[in-house]
Image (cartoon, rainbow, N blue to C red):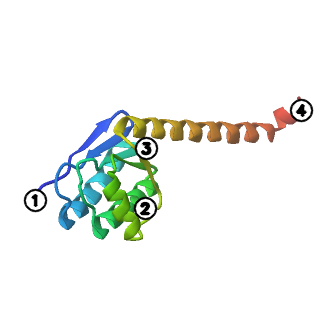
Amino acid sequence: MERVPVLKIGDILLVSIQIDMEDQVALQLQEDLADRIVATGCHGVIIDISALDIVDSFVGRTLATIASISRVLDAETVVVGMRPAVAITLVELGLSLPGIRTALNVELGMELLARHRAEEFTDLDELGDEDEADTPAAAAS
């Protein structure tokens, strides 16, 4: 059985699907990706589907499941390279792909993940500032 390669680029895992996504390949990708997120501690996943001409309901649901698993493991998922016919098919099948952000290409997907990560750090900094205001030293000043 063929496997979809999962590459690490900085803090991001890149999955470029270049083969037919048969059901067993999709399930194996789901497992492989979860294992790699845990092993690497990456916080972003980009799935490039630009080589896919069609996506059936099983593959669509598998993408949504991958995004859910990634989120539980503290990684955001961005699907890139979606062709118009694939987007139309997903909508017609009623698959909204919850939890998945999309971008036109890998470069834009990386920018989207970088912005999301920066927003998370900003939110954490703001929480830290609020905690400091509650300390006795801050109240005395």
Residue with the mark numbered 3: 43
Q: Earlier in the sequence, mark 3 or mark 1?
A: 1
Viewed as shown, does residue 56 lie left or right of 75?
Answer: left
Which residue extends farthest top?
141
Location of the C terminus by quadrant is: top right
Number of other residues with Cα within 10 Å of mark 1, as a class: few under 14, some 14 to 19, many 20 or more: few
Along the polypeptide, which appears first: circle 4 or circle 2?
2
Q: Nearer the viewer, mark 1 or mark 2?
A: 2
* Mark 1 to mark 4 CA distance (whole Å): 66 Å
Number of the front mark, 3 or 1: 1
User: Residue 58, percent across and down?
Assistant: 29, 69
Q: Position of residue 136 (x, y in %)?
A: 83, 37
Query: Label 1 is placed on what type of residue?
Result: Met
Please tell me whether mark 4 or mark 2 is closer to you in this view. Answer: 2
**Separation (CA) of disc 4 from disc 3:** 39 Å
Q: Is residue 126 left or right of residue 102?
A: right
Label ID, residue 1: 1
Question: Which structural element holds mark 4?
Answer: helix
Res 41 → quadrant: top left
- Residue at label 2? 97
> In the rendered view, would you say 51 is above or below 87?
above
Res. 35 in view: yes
User: Which residue is more in the foreground, 23 or 134?
Assistant: 23
Image coordinates of residue 68 in percent, x first then y, are 43, 60
| Left or right, residue 136 beside residue 112 | right
